Amino acid sequence: MITEERIACDYERTGHIQAASKAAHFDAFRDEQALLARVFDHRVELVSRADQRSEVGTEIYHGLLVDERSAALNPARYVEGLAPASNTLDALQTAFLETGGAQCGICTPGMLMAGRAYLDAGGGPDDDAIREAIAGNLCRCTGYTKIVEAIARAASQGSSQ
Ligand code: FES
């Protein structure tokens, strides 16, 4: 997103190391490693106390967690850059505005997410397929016609990303 929105925030892949000052911390690193892999498909390396001298030149810690892919950025510049990025609507959001697909707005986040998933999966401007894709999201205002029209319009514009 930083690249796509051209947010100038000094983003750089730097990597980082966490050192365990207690044995329990290294156990927590194991849990963190498993969680990162399972939830985010993000791999980190654990370095045992016996092997850590090559990384940090000491054996004072109870082991290390090495994340070679983590990154750093200037948080103030990042937040500053998010504001204009959040004012940019994609084709689906624009279609919702243009067709009146969003009225009271209660169902709109769910409809946009279902519509985006449908478009990203290659869905086209087929009313029945769109109605199936948004099933489970209840709308009390639009009668669904305008929502279906919005998603179909975005599909016709080749809005899958
Ligand atoms: S726009 Fe009001 S519930 Fe859908």
Image (spheres, helix red, strand yellow):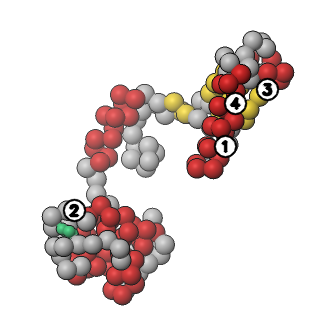
The amino acid beneath tag 3 is Ser
Q: CA distance from mark 2 to mark 3?
A: 51 Å
Q: Are marks 4 and 2 in contact (CB under 8 Å)?
A: no
Q: Relative to residue 97, is residue 73 drawn left or right?
A: right
Quarter of the image that includes the C terminus = bottom left
Rendered position, 50 above or below 43: above
Instruction: Indicate the position of residue 105 as horizontal and vertical percent values.
Output: 20, 62
Judged by depth in the image, the label closer to the viewer, 4 or 3, is 4
Q: CA distance from mark 4 to mark 2?
A: 44 Å
Q: Earlier in the sequence, mark 4 or mark 3?
A: 4
Q: Give the residue at mark 2.
A: 106
Q: Earlier in the sequence, mark 1 or mark 4?
A: 4
The amino acid beneath tag 2 is Ile
How many C-alpha atoms fall within 10 Å of the one at disc 1: few (<14), some, or many (≥20)? Answer: some
Q: CA distance from mark 1 to mark 4?
A: 11 Å
Judged by depth in the image, the label closer to the viewer, 1 or 4, is 4
Disc 3 element: loop
How many C-alpha atoms fall within 10 Å of the one at disc 3: few (<14), some, or many (≥20)? Answer: some
How many C-alpha atoms fall within 10 Å of the one at disc 2: few (<14), some, or many (≥20)? Answer: few
The amino acid beneath tag 1 is Ala
**Residue at x-position 27% and y-position 72%:** 138
Q: Which mark is residue 48?
A: 3
Q: Looking at the picture, tell me which residue is in the foreground, 74 or 30.
A: 30
Instruction: Indicate the position of residue 126 as horizontal and vertical percent values.
Output: 37, 86
Disc 4 element: helix
**Residue at x-position 74% and y-position 32%:** 46
Q: Give the residue at mark 4.
A: 27
